[in-house]
Amino acid sequence: MTRFWQRLDGTRRTLVATLAVVVFMGAMAWAAVPFYNWFCRVTGFGGTVLVSETGSEQVLDRTMLIRFDASKERGMPWEFRPLQTSMEVRIGETGLAFYEAYNPTDRPVAGSASYNVAPYEAGGYFIKIDCFCFTEQVLAPGERVQMPVTFYVDPEIVNDPDARRLRHITLSYTFHEIDLPEEYTLPGSAEQAALSPEDGGGTELN
């Protein structure tokens, strides 16, 4: 590499250096979004909540008011709303809330939900155990579903000088339309009937 560089004249060196910078900046731009998303998930930065497989081992006497918000990306045809506007839970207590989605169109629509909490300093302490936002959702024409989210507020929030004075947290979801999964078949369609032995289709194995 050193010999190659020494063989180049000034103009070619400048050209090679410029190309290297362009390639490097392009690579950094490509990596920035996934790295930022990972950083937010790990730290709760920007109101991104954390995830746990289990509930908290500690429940405090102090309570927190959780507010629920729903919105849609422009062009998303679903109706989407929280089934409760707010809920008061003890810090460390596992809460269960529901959102409802309805597809009023005559076609199946797939959606993916992005989420965050406000104020931002609460992001690292709002822990989800399970959520409809972890997977994509597909609604058939006219289908209405209720989607749960289980969560708790980490008791460590009371030890954070910036977050311990919080008395309420708002959990917000935004649904975006995405492409239908390739394996999706419309309920009641000929393709699905061919795969359902109980409906008289397909081949039943003994």
Image (cartoon, helix red, strand yellow):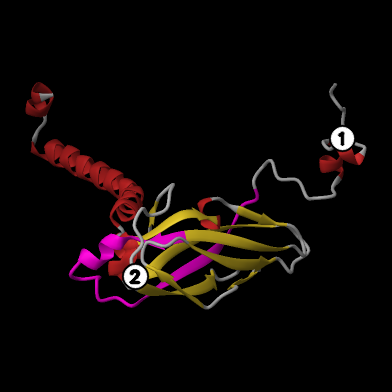
Drawn side of residue 134 relative to residue 8, left or right: right
User: Is residue 76 something that shows in the picture?
Assistant: no
Q: Is residue 162 above or below residue 145?
A: below
Q: Which of these two is toward me, 127 or 142? A: 127
Q: Which of the numbered marks, if any, corresponds to residue 61?
A: 2
Q: Which residues are magenta?
A: 151-180
Spatial CA distance of label 2 from label 1 is 53 Å
Q: Residue at x 13, y 24 (%)?
A: 1
Q: Where residue 197 is drawn, which disc sits there? A: 1
Placement of the C terminus among the 4 image quadrants: top right
Task: Tell me what residue is drawn at x 51 percent, y 67 percent.
Answer: 174
Secondary structure of the residue carrying tag 1 is: helix
Residue 120 at x, y = what percent?
Answer: 31, 69
Q: Does the stretch in magenta take in 112? A: no
Which quadrant holds residue 77?
A: bottom right
Q: Earlier in the sequence, mark 2 or mark 1?
A: 2
Label ID, residue 157: none
